[in-house]
Image (tube, rainbow, N blue to C red):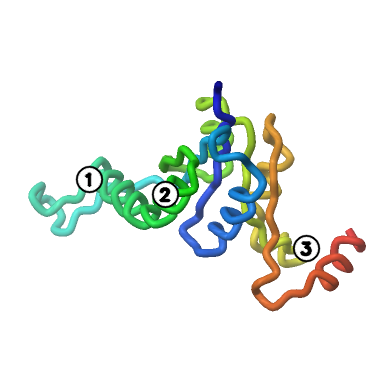
Amino acid sequence: MTRKKVVVPIDGSEFSLEVLPTITQMFEPEQTELILLHVAPEPQVIELEPGDPEMTVYVDQQEAGQRSNFDDDMLPQLRRLQKAGFAASTAMRFGEPTEEIEQFISDNGIDLVAMSTHGRTGLARMMFGSVAEHVLHHSKVPIMLYRSFANGASAEKASAQEATL
């Protein structure tokens, strides 16, 4: 039996992880593979002392360090997911988040994208943009958006905001 692949974009914040409990309640562990995906900015060569190659941090070194840090940060999440019976792993890409998420979906046969969203509207959405909104409108696979109300917003207030859209 083939497991359904669910990618969970992680931006490095605790907020982006808030979708995980909902996923674990909605999907059967033996039928679901979860991939925690982080997209980081493209690394640049850093010369600590210009002209001295021994004092230069190269792109591949930065990428390796960022991958290692992400894997370390996600280890508690992976352990919880695996203990619950899910096949779970991490993945990392470098570049513009929306483009890299779309490419990851295409390259890996992803069945669903599950992500947290702030649910900003109006001016806030224009100013901050929305990776979730872009993925929602451009993805060729189903998207599950999770909006947390832990930040003091109430469900009633959110419903009123959504009704005005």
Q: Earlier in the sequence, mark 2 or mark 3?
A: 2
User: What's the CA distance linking mark 2 and mark 3?
Assistant: 32 Å
The residue under label 1 is which amino acid type? Gln
Residue drawn at 29 percent across, 49 percent down:
68
- Furthest-bottom residue in view? 152
Q: Are marks 2 and 3 in contact (CB under 8 Å)?
A: no
Q: Please state which of residues 61 and 149 is positioned toward the viewer in this rendering.
A: 149
* Residue under label 1: 61
- The local secondary structure at tag 1 comes to helix
Q: Is residue 130 above or below residue 27?
A: below
Q: Which percent across, then down, holds residue 32?
A: 56, 35
Looking at the rendered image, the disc whose residue lies closer to the viewer, 2 or 1, is 2
Q: In this view, does 4 lie above or below 10?
A: above
Q: Please state which of residues 105 and 133 is positioned toward the viewer in this rendering.
A: 105
* Residue under label 3: 121
Looking at the rendered image, the disc whose residue lies closer to the viewer, 2 or 3, is 2
Q: Which of marks 2 and 1 is nearer the N terminus?
A: 1
* Residue under label 2: 78
Q: Are marks 3 and 1 in contact (CB under 8 Å)?
A: no
User: What's the CA distance linking mark 3 and mark 1?
Assistant: 39 Å
Q: Earlier in the sequence, mark 3 or mark 1?
A: 1
In this picture, residue 124 sits left or right of residue 23: right
